[in-house]
Image: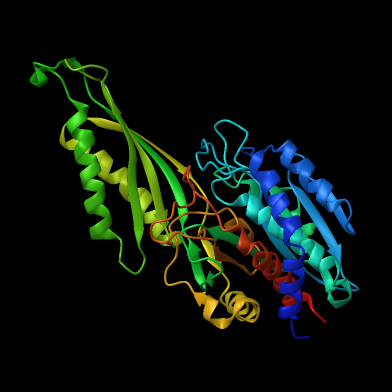
Amino acid sequence: MPIPAADLLAAARADADRTVDLRRRLHRTPELGLHLPRTQATVLEELAGLPVEVTTGTSTTSVVGVLRGARPGPTCLLRADMDALPVHEDTGLPFASEVPGAMHACGHDLHTAMLLGAARLLTERRDEIVGQVVLMLQPGEEGFHGARYMLEEGLLDAVPEAPVVGAFALHVFANQPSGVVSVRPGPMMAAADHWEVTVRGRGGHASMPHAAADPVPVAAEIVLALQAMVTRRAPVFDPAVVTVANLVAGSTDNVIPDTAYLQGTIRTLSPERRADVVASVRRVATHVAAAHDMEIDFVHQQGYPVTDNDPAVADRVLAVAGELVGPERSVVAAEPLMGAEDFAYVLQRVPGAMAFLGACPPGAEPETAAGNHSNLVVFDEDVLPAGAALYAAMALDTLGG
């Protein structure tokens, strides 16, 4: 059955005031991490009037809703994240965060509002749905592995008799052209790993470095050696990013410290490159230190895997978005984003895709607009109807009779 793109978008626009109001209420009261009681209560209130079977998480404040179509069939999953960032908002918006040190700086308030808008659109079109739609509203995307917790609690078994056959998520970006949907087959976002290196030297008086074992220049050598390692070991077609984001050593000007501490991130687009770069960071740090007769302690924490879009689903996103917003505004992303996303855990289990929706604010240029995670980021709320319609359209494309 063809997707009623024009009707969906018109209905989403007619419902825009409600969607914007919900977004602004969420924006005013951001919460961090895996436990978002106020946000969960707002979501449950919005779902209460819909024919949706709702369950909540036990280890987190997640929400799962099941909307059943007119006839039995497979299950499609739509996901939105709900958590904010530990950022103090400085936008000056009339609906700015009322919580000091917390801000919806990554657009998760828009995601949640769009998905609940899509739930209303799908409720009105239940007769067109053969199967079920699972609404996945998750906490803890910002580094807390919220999607993994939901999977462990049985997310994909929300409809035991009908397994999930497809999954879709949407992410807004303030420094991409407003209203443009972009997606690509294969890696859409990177895997992320955290690492720490402690260089163990021997302290002493700063005037007599020969009598000590100074870890500071060794740490500096490690920083430079890691950059050379990436450019000479990672192929340009299977890239890697290694960033040293924190370097701490010493406490005053005339004391050589015992240790120097470095930490940073690794971003990769394939499991093979990921394993190789983690091993290489350890090896480079170990041997640079050994050249100066020192040792290191190495800590590695594995973060999110690669967000890997199923090619067939990515093609469907392009086609469906083209019907909704026009083919000129539905484009193949030129390259992956080296940020990371825990929707990757879902895509490891079922075929699906994450797409980006540009939300550059009016009067700004994408190249210079404050980006996601900035304390100054502002999103164009005019994209909310298109996002809600795209969520609904992807479900209808998967399950339409």
Where does residue 393 sit, x and y in percent of width and height? 72, 73
Q: Residue at x 35, y 58 (%)?
A: 240
Is 154 on the left-hand or right-hand side of 177?
Answer: right
Colour approach in the figure:
rainbow
Q: 242 above or below 329?
A: above
Residue at 78% x, 75% y: name it: 399
Identify the residue at the far bottom of this view: 1
| Residue 394 vs residue 156, the one in the foreground | 394
**Quadrant hosting residue 104:** top right
Q: Indicate the quadrant containing the C terminus: top left, top right, bottom left or bottom right.
A: bottom right
The spot of residue 358 in percent (x, y) is: 53, 64
**In the figure, 13 relative to 216: above or below?**
below
Q: Which picture quadrant has residue 232?
A: bottom left
In the image, residue 25 sits, relative to residue 176, either above or below, namely above
**Number of marks:** 0
Visible residue check, residue 32: yes
| Side (left or right) of 194 relative to 318 | left
Residue 161 showing in the rendered view: no
Q: Quadrant of residue 71?
A: bottom right
Who's the residue at 42% across and 69% down the image? 335
Give the answer, above or below, for where 66 lies relative to 372.
Answer: below
Residue 178 at x, y = what percent?
53, 65
Left or right placement of residue 319 versus residue 126 in this view: left
Quick one: quadrant of the N terminus? bottom right
Place of residue 220 in the rendered image (x, y in percent of width and height, measured from the top left): 21, 37
